[in-house]
Image: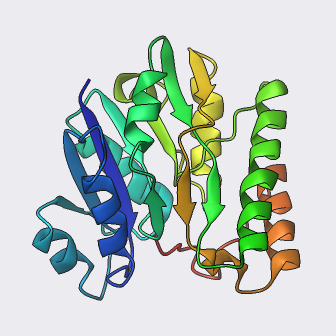
Amino acid sequence: MRISVVIPAHNEETLLPGALQAVLQQTLPPFEVIVVDNASTDRTREVAEALGVRVVYCARKGVAYARQAGLLAARGEWVAMTDADSLPLPTWLQSLAHRAEGAVALYGPLRFYGVSPWAGVVSEWGYRAFLNLMAFLGRPNLAGANMMVLKEAALKVGGFPEVEAREDVLLGWRLRQIGKVRYVPEALVLTSPRRLKGGWGRFLAQQLRNLLGDSRGYFGEDGGRER
Protein backbone atom coordinates (compact mmCIF):
# COMPACT_ATOMS: atom_id res chain seq x y z
CA MET A 1 0.00 0.00 0.00
CA ARG A 2 1.41 3.38 -1.03
CA ILE A 3 0.25 6.19 1.25
CA SER A 4 0.91 9.86 0.51
CA VAL A 5 0.66 12.11 3.56
CA VAL A 6 -0.53 15.66 2.85
CA ILE A 7 -0.11 18.56 5.28
CA PRO A 8 -1.62 21.94 4.29
CA ALA A 9 0.32 24.83 5.83
CA HIS A 10 -0.17 28.59 5.93
CA ASN A 11 2.56 30.39 7.89
CA GLU A 12 3.42 27.33 9.94
CA GLU A 13 7.21 27.58 10.30
CA THR A 14 6.96 27.15 14.08
CA LEU A 15 4.74 24.08 14.41
CA LEU A 16 5.40 22.37 11.08
CA PRO A 17 8.70 20.68 12.12
CA GLY A 18 6.93 18.76 14.88
CA ALA A 19 4.22 17.53 12.54
CA LEU A 20 6.75 16.46 9.93
CA GLN A 21 8.91 14.62 12.46
CA ALA A 22 5.84 12.75 13.70
CA VAL A 23 4.91 11.71 10.15
CA LEU A 24 8.45 10.75 9.21
CA GLN A 25 8.74 8.52 12.30
CA GLN A 26 5.70 6.36 11.55
CA THR A 27 5.99 2.61 12.08
CA LEU A 28 4.55 2.29 8.56
CA PRO A 29 6.64 4.73 6.52
CA PRO A 30 4.67 6.91 4.08
CA PHE A 31 5.31 6.59 0.37
CA GLU A 32 5.76 10.37 0.27
CA VAL A 33 5.10 13.43 2.41
CA ILE A 34 3.68 16.57 0.79
CA VAL A 35 3.48 19.98 2.43
CA VAL A 36 1.08 22.29 0.61
CA ASP A 37 2.42 25.81 1.06
CA ASN A 38 -0.82 27.78 1.12
CA ALA A 39 0.42 31.29 0.22
CA SER A 40 2.72 31.47 3.24
CA THR A 41 4.72 34.61 3.92
CA ASP A 42 7.08 33.03 6.45
CA ARG A 43 9.65 30.20 6.13
CA THR A 44 7.11 27.37 5.80
CA ARG A 45 8.53 26.22 2.47
CA GLU A 46 12.15 26.37 3.65
CA VAL A 47 11.33 24.41 6.81
CA ALA A 48 9.62 21.67 4.80
CA GLU A 49 12.39 21.42 2.24
CA ALA A 50 15.02 21.25 4.97
CA LEU A 51 13.35 18.08 6.22
CA GLY A 52 13.40 16.57 2.75
CA VAL A 53 9.70 16.48 1.98
CA ARG A 54 7.93 17.48 -1.19
CA VAL A 55 6.43 21.00 -1.33
CA VAL A 56 3.47 21.98 -3.50
CA TYR A 57 2.46 25.63 -3.74
CA CYS A 58 -1.19 26.69 -3.57
CA ALA A 59 -1.67 30.42 -4.19
CA ARG A 60 -5.38 30.50 -3.38
CA LYS A 61 -5.64 30.91 0.38
CA GLY A 62 -8.01 28.56 2.16
CA VAL A 63 -7.58 25.10 3.63
CA ALA A 64 -10.07 23.49 1.24
CA TYR A 65 -8.01 24.64 -1.73
CA ALA A 66 -4.79 23.48 -0.08
CA ARG A 67 -6.20 20.05 0.69
CA GLN A 68 -7.45 19.69 -2.88
CA ALA A 69 -4.04 20.70 -4.25
CA GLY A 70 -2.41 18.04 -2.09
CA LEU A 71 -4.93 15.42 -3.14
CA LEU A 72 -4.28 16.15 -6.82
CA ALA A 73 -0.50 16.13 -6.37
CA ALA A 74 -0.35 12.89 -4.39
CA ARG A 75 1.21 9.91 -6.14
CA GLY A 76 0.05 7.25 -3.71
CA GLU A 77 -3.14 5.22 -4.06
CA TRP A 78 -4.13 6.37 -0.58
CA VAL A 79 -3.89 9.94 0.72
CA ALA A 80 -3.66 10.53 4.46
CA MET A 81 -4.05 14.03 5.82
CA THR A 82 -3.06 15.77 9.02
CA ASP A 83 -2.46 19.39 9.99
CA ALA A 84 0.70 21.37 10.59
CA ASP A 85 -0.18 21.82 14.27
CA SER A 86 -0.87 18.12 14.81
CA LEU A 87 1.18 15.14 15.98
CA PRO A 88 0.05 11.71 14.77
CA LEU A 89 1.02 8.88 17.08
CA PRO A 90 3.78 6.61 15.64
CA THR A 91 1.26 3.87 14.76
CA TRP A 92 -1.19 6.26 13.04
CA LEU A 93 -0.63 5.15 9.45
CA GLN A 94 -0.28 1.53 10.46
CA SER A 95 -3.64 1.64 12.24
CA LEU A 96 -5.38 3.25 9.26
CA ALA A 97 -3.79 0.87 6.76
CA HIS A 98 -4.77 -2.16 8.86
CA ARG A 99 -8.45 -1.22 8.51
CA ALA A 100 -8.35 0.05 4.91
CA GLU A 101 -9.47 -3.07 3.05
CA GLY A 102 -12.94 -2.56 1.60
CA ALA A 103 -13.09 1.12 2.54
CA VAL A 104 -12.86 4.35 0.55
CA ALA A 105 -12.06 6.54 3.58
CA LEU A 106 -10.95 6.20 7.18
CA TYR A 107 -10.70 8.61 10.11
CA GLY A 108 -9.72 8.65 13.77
CA PRO A 109 -9.98 10.65 17.00
CA LEU A 110 -8.14 13.77 18.16
CA ARG A 111 -6.80 14.97 21.49
CA PHE A 112 -5.49 18.41 22.48
CA TYR A 113 -1.88 18.55 23.61
CA GLY A 114 -0.31 21.34 25.67
CA VAL A 115 -3.33 21.60 27.96
CA SER A 116 -4.04 20.36 31.48
CA PRO A 117 -4.41 16.58 31.89
CA TRP A 118 -8.12 17.10 32.60
CA ALA A 119 -8.65 19.14 29.43
CA GLY A 120 -6.74 16.58 27.37
CA VAL A 121 -8.89 13.72 28.63
CA VAL A 122 -12.11 15.69 28.09
CA SER A 123 -11.11 16.69 24.57
CA GLU A 124 -10.27 13.12 23.55
CA TRP A 125 -13.14 11.22 25.11
CA GLY A 126 -15.69 13.87 24.33
CA TYR A 127 -14.63 13.74 20.70
CA ARG A 128 -14.62 9.93 20.69
CA ALA A 129 -18.20 9.93 22.00
CA PHE A 130 -19.19 12.41 19.29
CA LEU A 131 -17.55 10.32 16.54
CA ASN A 132 -19.24 7.15 17.76
CA LEU A 133 -22.61 8.90 17.76
CA MET A 134 -22.13 10.28 14.26
CA ALA A 135 -20.97 6.90 12.97
CA PHE A 136 -24.07 5.29 14.51
CA LEU A 137 -26.23 7.90 12.75
CA GLY A 138 -24.53 7.12 9.44
CA ARG A 139 -22.92 10.55 9.19
CA PRO A 140 -19.15 10.04 9.42
CA ASN A 141 -17.26 13.07 10.69
CA LEU A 142 -13.89 13.14 8.94
CA ALA A 143 -11.39 15.64 10.32
CA GLY A 144 -8.60 17.06 8.16
CA ALA A 145 -6.14 16.45 10.99
CA ASN A 146 -6.84 12.71 10.97
CA MET A 147 -8.18 11.09 7.83
CA MET A 148 -7.19 8.91 4.88
CA VAL A 149 -8.97 8.55 1.55
CA LEU A 150 -8.63 6.36 -1.50
CA LYS A 151 -7.48 8.91 -4.06
CA GLU A 152 -9.44 7.44 -6.95
CA ALA A 153 -12.66 7.49 -4.94
CA ALA A 154 -12.09 11.02 -3.63
CA LEU A 155 -11.56 12.36 -7.13
CA LYS A 156 -14.60 10.45 -8.38
CA VAL A 157 -16.83 12.47 -6.03
CA GLY A 158 -15.11 15.76 -6.88
CA GLY A 159 -12.58 15.99 -4.06
CA PHE A 160 -12.80 18.67 -1.38
CA PRO A 161 -15.63 21.17 -1.91
CA GLU A 162 -14.73 24.87 -2.08
CA VAL A 163 -16.08 25.94 1.29
CA GLU A 164 -14.63 27.89 4.21
CA ALA A 165 -15.05 25.02 6.66
CA ARG A 166 -16.34 21.43 6.81
CA GLU A 167 -14.58 20.51 3.57
CA ASP A 168 -13.32 17.36 5.30
CA VAL A 169 -16.74 16.38 6.67
CA LEU A 170 -18.48 17.09 3.36
CA LEU A 171 -15.98 14.96 1.44
CA GLY A 172 -16.67 12.12 3.87
CA TRP A 173 -20.41 12.42 3.30
CA ARG A 174 -19.84 12.30 -0.47
CA LEU A 175 -17.62 9.24 -0.14
CA ARG A 176 -20.13 7.31 1.95
CA GLN A 177 -22.42 7.37 -1.10
CA ILE A 178 -19.99 5.19 -3.05
CA GLY A 179 -18.30 3.05 -0.43
CA LYS A 180 -17.43 2.30 3.18
CA VAL A 181 -16.21 5.16 5.40
CA ARG A 182 -14.66 3.59 8.50
CA TYR A 183 -13.94 5.03 11.95
CA VAL A 184 -10.62 3.76 13.38
CA PRO A 185 -10.55 4.47 17.17
CA GLU A 186 -6.91 3.46 17.61
CA ALA A 187 -5.62 5.96 15.00
CA LEU A 188 -5.11 8.84 17.43
CA VAL A 189 -3.69 12.24 16.50
CA LEU A 190 -2.70 14.95 18.98
CA THR A 191 -3.54 18.50 17.93
CA SER A 192 -2.71 21.95 19.29
CA PRO A 193 -5.13 23.86 21.54
CA ARG A 194 -4.98 27.07 19.52
CA ARG A 195 -8.64 26.57 18.61
CA LEU A 196 -9.36 27.25 22.30
CA LYS A 197 -8.10 30.84 22.22
CA GLY A 198 -11.57 32.18 22.90
CA GLY A 199 -12.32 29.56 25.56
CA TRP A 200 -14.26 26.29 25.53
CA GLY A 201 -17.62 28.03 25.15
CA ARG A 202 -16.67 29.80 21.95
CA PHE A 203 -14.95 26.66 20.63
CA LEU A 204 -18.02 24.47 21.22
CA ALA A 205 -20.33 27.10 19.71
CA GLN A 206 -18.15 27.19 16.60
CA GLN A 207 -18.26 23.41 16.36
CA LEU A 208 -22.05 23.45 16.60
CA ARG A 209 -22.31 26.09 13.87
CA ASN A 210 -19.91 24.07 11.75
CA LEU A 211 -21.88 20.86 12.28
CA LEU A 212 -25.14 22.60 11.36
CA GLY A 213 -23.58 23.85 8.15
CA ASP A 214 -23.14 27.55 8.97
CA SER A 215 -19.41 28.04 8.43
CA ARG A 216 -19.56 31.75 7.56
CA GLY A 217 -16.91 33.69 9.43
CA TYR A 218 -15.74 30.49 11.09
CA PHE A 219 -12.09 31.32 10.60
CA GLY A 220 -12.14 35.10 10.49
CA GLU A 221 -13.00 37.69 7.91
CA ASP A 222 -10.63 36.34 5.27
CA GLY A 223 -11.89 32.80 5.64
CA GLY A 224 -8.36 31.48 5.95
CA ARG A 225 -7.16 28.84 8.35
CA GLU A 226 -3.60 28.48 9.45
CA ARG A 227 -2.60 24.89 9.00
The image quadrant that residue 136 belongs to is top right
Which residue is at the front of the view, 158 or 211?
211
At horizontal 59% and vertical 32% (from top left) the residue drawn is 184
**In the image, 215: left or right of 6?**
right
Which residue is at the front of the view, 145 or 155?
145
At horizontal 66% and vertical 31% (from top left) the residue drawn is 173
**What sort of colour scheme is used for the picture?**
rainbow
The image quadrant that residue 131 belongs to is top right
Instruction: Please say whether residue 89 is visible from this viewpoint.
Output: yes
Which residue is at the front of the view, 180 or 210?
180
At horizontal 75% and vertical 62% (from top left) the residue drawn is 121
Which residue is at the front of the view, 66 or 186?
186
Find the residue positioned furthest to the top.
Answer: 102
**Measured from the top left, where is residue 169 in percent x and y?**
64, 43
Instruction: Please say whether residue 215 is visible from this viewpoint.
Output: no
Image quadrant containing the N terminus: top left
**Measured from the top left, where is residue 122 in percent x and y?**
80, 62
Image quadrant containing the C terminus: bottom left
Find the residue positioned furthest to the front.
Answer: 117
Establish if 107 lies above or below 16: above
Establish if 16 lies above or below 142: below
**Measured from the top left, where is residue 217 in percent x and y?**
71, 74
At horizontal 87% and vertical 69% (from top left) the residue drawn is 205
